[in-house]
Image (cartoon, rainbow, N blue to C red):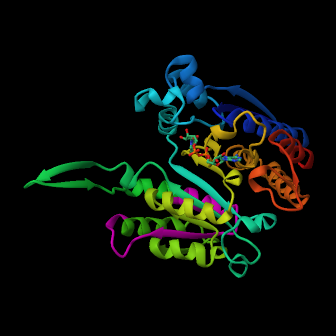
Amino acid sequence: MSYNVALIPGDGIGPEIVEQAVQVLDTAGKKFGFTLNYTKLLMGGASIDVHGIPLTDETIETAKKNDAVLMGSIGGDAKTSPWYKLEPSRRPEAGLLKLRKSLNLFANLRPAYLYKELKDACPLRDEIIGDGFDMMIMRELTGGLYFGERKTVEENGVKKAIDTLTYDENEIRRIAKRGFDIAMKRRKKVTSVDKANVLDSSRLWRSVVEEVAKDYPEVTLEHMLVDNCAMQLVRDPKQFDVILTENMFGDILSDEASMVTGSIGMLSSASLNETSFGLYEPSHGSAPDIAGKDIANPIATILSAAMMLRFSLNLDEAADAIENAVSQVLKDGYRTGDIMSEGCTKVGCKEMGRLIAERV
Ligand code: NAD
């Protein structure tokens, strides 16, 4: 089998970490009998340098023709990079927002998985961590408060700001279906997070999620209020499998969940649309402070590549092999600088990529 993947190395450490992900993907391809054909695309600062804008229409069209997009990260140092002297719509980050919108990516997935070997980086107490945790935060990405009408008015000399939180049932249904589909590939539990004791949008959310749940009798559904969820994430993160939630709640909870895993260099993410197409990228930025030094941790990008195999290309076995290879490399005591601890062997970005590929 052969698949087409658009590669956006991006800026800063982007090209270094994407190179390692490609090495690991190609090794998995040889082992499991598939080929990936890559098309390299420019976005962010790299595109500004060549085209004067962070994303061209041509790039969007080419990205759409692929089965998935694998990205490094984009952006530079906001204080020193000339890209930030441009007006906001021409800066690197504008390219990413435009790409997400053009590809209609409405579902964002961020796993929060605690590797036993990295337990020391977790800020939670040992008795809370137990045998570790493994959850997937599924956040709606194109609706809700961030996309509703907003305005600031002045009434009788008093300024007033208004934001609106809107969801229609179709928007809720499509993300809920995605959430249940993903739960079916995991431990078959969905925790739907809302604020149904106060918000109408949350009451609609809850009823549509319940309706969708009827098509997934094997999946256990529970509802949780967002304030309680924020608390439960640090009180007992083991209880969660898939957390399904709307845009703003997901924004906040996914950052909280990722922080309890400890290291930013380990966190992968995926953004999906209604087809199997997806954009896969690490949760971290382009780390301009360490770019070009061969010290970046490529694991978040390698794990994003594994998600791409699982969710866009349906190559679960190969995805498992990559995830197991990452676990094994950590068990074998290899660490990049950001996750280094006593008694381990410190390696650079390239060597980490090679060690993981070797274990696939
Ligand atoms: P950052 O995530 O790039 O870096 C924060 C800190 O974490 C830095 O000290 C960095 O060295 C370290 N770090 C990040 N990734 C690492 C890795 N893989 N291995 C080792 N250390 C790592 O966040 P920032 O400094 O706030 O942002 C830098 C640039 O990245 C900005 O231009 C920002 O806009 C952009 N950014 C892009 C994305 C994206 O492309 N999706 C996301 C966030 C930030």
Asked whether residue 33 appears in the rendered view, the answer is: no
Q: Residue at x 7, y 55 (%)?
A: 156
Q: Is residue 192 magenta?
A: yes
Q: Which residues are magenta?
A: 176-201
Q: Quadrant of residue 341?
A: bottom right
Whereabouts is ligand 1, in terms of quadrant? top right
Q: Is residue 122 magenta?
A: no
Q: Is residue 273 left or right of residue 310?
A: left
Residue ranking furthest to the left: 156
Measured from the top left, where is residue 145 in percent x and y?
36, 55
Measured from the top left, where is residue 295 in percent x and y?
77, 42
Asked whether residue 168 appears in the rendered view, the answer is: yes
Vertical arrangement, residue 288 with respect to residue 300, above or below:
above
Q: Residue at x 69, y 67 (%)?
A: 122
Relative depth, front residue between 50 and 225: 50
Relative depth, front residue between 322 and 82: 82
Q: Residue at x 61, y 62 (%)?
A: 259
Q: Is residue 307 left or right of residue 343?
A: left
Q: Residue at x 41, y 51 (%)?
A: 143
Measured from the top left, where is residue 231 in percent x and y?
52, 76
